Image (cartoon, rainbow, N blue to C red):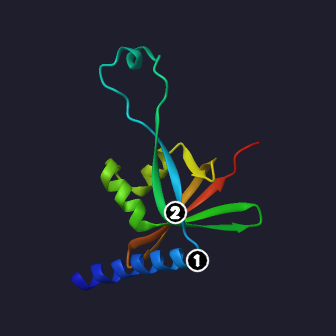
Amino acid sequence: MGELLQSSDGAIRLADAVMRSAGGRMVLLRLAAPAVPNADAEQLGLATPAYQDVALGPATFHKANSVIKLLISASAVHEVVGSLGFDSANVLFETAVGLFVDDLLYKITNSYSSQAMGMPYCYWLTLEPPVR
């Protein structure tokens, strides 16, 4: 069992190194901030929506034809999933408002992982560019 965990950790470290050497960058995942319990404005629906931006990286872009995909390190995603209490990376990406890249907010339309020995080592996000 220890060998299995070490092998999948190696795949994550290798993916991180490749993304960094390929010019990996940081992107911001925009999430809705949790509601404040017992706040009158929240209960009446008068509160202004609040957001929190979470840094993810290394990340690299892949553009083929008109499809924009972003490759994100699994180590960064797993850290956010654990620290914010999400059930999985899929839930994290489904509930996200979008992804900030160079001050533009992209919509996440699809997410999936690449795996080694049953453990994700990177996540692919299909992005829809903002409408100008």
Q: Position of residue 93 (x, y in %)?
A: 49, 51
Residue 6 shows which numbered tag? none
| Quadrant in which the C terminus appears | top right
Residue density around tag 2, few if under 14, some if 14–19, many if 20 or more, within 10 Å: some
Tell me if residue 80 comes above or below residue 105 in the rendering: below
Q: Amino acid at mark 2?
A: Tyr
The residue that appears at 46% across and 55% down in the rendered structure is 55
Residue 22 shows which numbered tag? 1
Q: Position of residue 67 (x, y in %)?
A: 71, 61
Q: Position of residue 58 (x, y in %)?
A: 49, 67
| Quadrant in which the N terminus appears | bottom left
The residue that appears at 41% across and 63% down in the rendered structure is 76
Tell me if residue 16 comes above or below residue 66 in the rendering: below
In this picture, residue 62 sits left or right of residue 48: right
Label 1: state its secondary structure.
loop
Viewer can see residue 1: no
Q: Which residue is mark 2?
A: 112
Q: Which quadrant would residue 7 be assigned to in this image? A: bottom left
Tell me if residue 49 comes above or below residue 126 in the rendering: above
Residue density around tag 1, few if under 14, some if 14–19, many if 20 or more, within 10 Å: few
